[in-house]
Amino acid sequence: MSNPLLQAFFVGRALAEVVNERLEVALTDALSEIGKFDAEAREQLRQFTEEVLERANRAADAAQTGQTTTGSKPAGGGAVDLQATVDELRAEIALLRTELQRYRSSS
């Protein structure tokens, strides 16, 4: 190439193509990582919710049969109000479900 203007044109065009390809790869990788992170976060939240609900159900079942979750009886003469405990657990579950719905709707 004897014409420097023509050479500059082709160098600029090649530079633009390479930059465009690299930006495309970088953007694709970034979006892929964001998607993976979102999927992992949702899965962890789902597992956490399942575990909480499972433990709450076990505790409620144990309360209905008159057992305690720790296997020990309450000390002293203090009576444990099982219905109040179940109501508190249900309120916590309702709060957790509300937060979960809010998280899902914001995503």
Image (tube, helix red, strand yellow):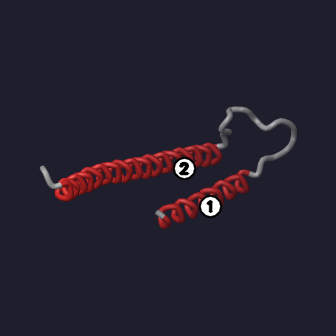
Can you give x and y, in whole percent of width and height, for residue 106 in the image? Answer: 50, 66
Among the two numbered marks 2 and 1 on one chain, the one whose residue lies closer to the N terminus: 2
Q: In front here: 6 or 36? A: 6
Q: Answer with the quarter of the image where residue 75 lies.
A: top right
Q: Is residue 13 above or below residue 71?
A: below
Task: Determine whether the residue tagged by mark 1 lies in a helix, strand or loop.
Answer: helix
- Dot 1, how many residues are within 10 Å of its Cα: few (below 14), some (14-19), or many (20+)? few
- Tag 1 residue: 95
What amino acid type is highlighted by mark number 2?
Leu
Can you give x and y, in whole percent of width and height, for residue 11 in the image? Answer: 22, 52
Q: Residue at x 73, y 32 (%)?
A: 72
Q: Is residue 14 above or below residue 58?
A: below
Q: Residue at x 37, y 53 (%)?
A: 31
Q: In front here: 57 or 36? A: 36
Quick check: 32 left or right of 11? Answer: right
What amino acid type is highlighted by mark number 1?
Leu
- Dot 2, how many residues are within 10 Å of its Cα: few (below 14), some (14-19), or many (20+)? some
Q: Determine which of the numbered discs, if any, sits on residue 29 in the image.
A: none
Can you give x and y, in whole percent of width and height, for residue 95 in the image? Answer: 62, 61
Which residue lies most toward the right here? Answer: 77
Q: Answer with the quarter of the image where residue 73 lies.
A: top right
Quick check: 22 left or right of 57? Answer: left
Q: In front here: 102 or 15? A: 15
In front: label 2 or label 1: 1
Can you give x and y, in whole percent of width and height, for residue 96 in the image? Answer: 59, 58
Q: Residue at x 57, y 61 (%)?
A: 99
Quick check: 40 left or right of 8? Answer: right
Task: Determine whether the residue tagged by mark 2 lies in a helix, strand or loop.
Answer: helix
Measure the alpha-carbon separation of dots 2 and 1.
12 Å
Q: Determine which of the numbered discs, if any, sits on residue 53 in the image.
A: 2
Q: How many marks?
A: 2
Mark 2–mark 1 CB contact (< 8 Å): no
